[in-house]
Image (spheres, helix red, strand yellow):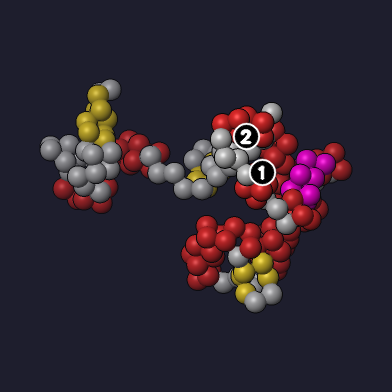
Amino acid sequence: MVYIERNGVNIPIKGEINFAEYMKSGYKGYFATLDDYILHQSLCFPDVRLKQYIEIRNHDSSDINHALCLCAFYKGLNSCEITDLIKEFNFIKIDDIDNLNKKIIKDGLDFMVNSNVSGWDVAARLFNIARKNLNSKERIYLLPVFQMLAKRKTQADIILDYDISNISDLIEFLS
């Protein structure tokens, strides 16, 4: 835990205890409340979390075209039938998810789910499902990712290929 709040005053905890310990025994005379739980949960930052809305946090540095692409992607994906997703990805087992997450971090979209399905294939399948659930005007926004999928190059690959070695290179790349 980082802190609790009482009457508008922050009481620092600085990681001395976790929330379970706080619920059980309190902290320096303070005892857990629902507001403490809500505050504690607001300080956790997973990729996706459910609040009064669905918050998706892992796309912080996209340009406008990719930001619009993500909006269209999530709209299309959230409009699909869950059975379509289950059918399309039935080869991925729930026990494999943690391992796949580690592979993505290490290998990007070059990771392999099994011997014949890559991260590129998974991304293409997801974007194709999203595309099916959008109208023709909305599908246009998916184009940047379909171009990346065709080239098998992510934004990170493009930046690495640019060989930015100093601030002038970075400014030129960003302009």
Placement of 25 over or under 110, stated as above or below: above
Spot the residue most to the bottom.
Answer: 115
Q: Amino acid at mark 2?
A: Asp
Residue depicted at x 67% and y 34%: 173
Three-letter code, disc 1: Tyr
- Extent of the magenta region: 140-147
C-alpha span from label 1 to label 2 = 9 Å
Q: Which mark is residue 169?
A: 2
In the displayed orientation, state which residue is furthest to the top. 8
User: Splitting the image into 4 quarters, where does residue 43 fall?
Assistant: top left
Q: Residues within 10 Å of mark 1 (few under 14, many from 20)?
A: few
x 28%, y 22%: residue: 8
Rendered location of residue 166, percent (x, y): 56, 35
Query: Which residue carries the number 1 mark?
Result: 162
> Vertically, is 37 above or below 85?
above
Magenta highlight on residue 169: no
Q: Position of residue 168 (x, y in %)?
A: 60, 30
The quarter of the picture where the N terminus appears is top left
- Specify the principal SS of the magenta part: helix
Query: Would residue 81 be visible to someone looking at this image?
Result: no
Q: Secondary structure at mark 2?
A: helix
Tally of numbered discs: 2
| Label 1 or label 2, whichever comes before in sequence order | 1
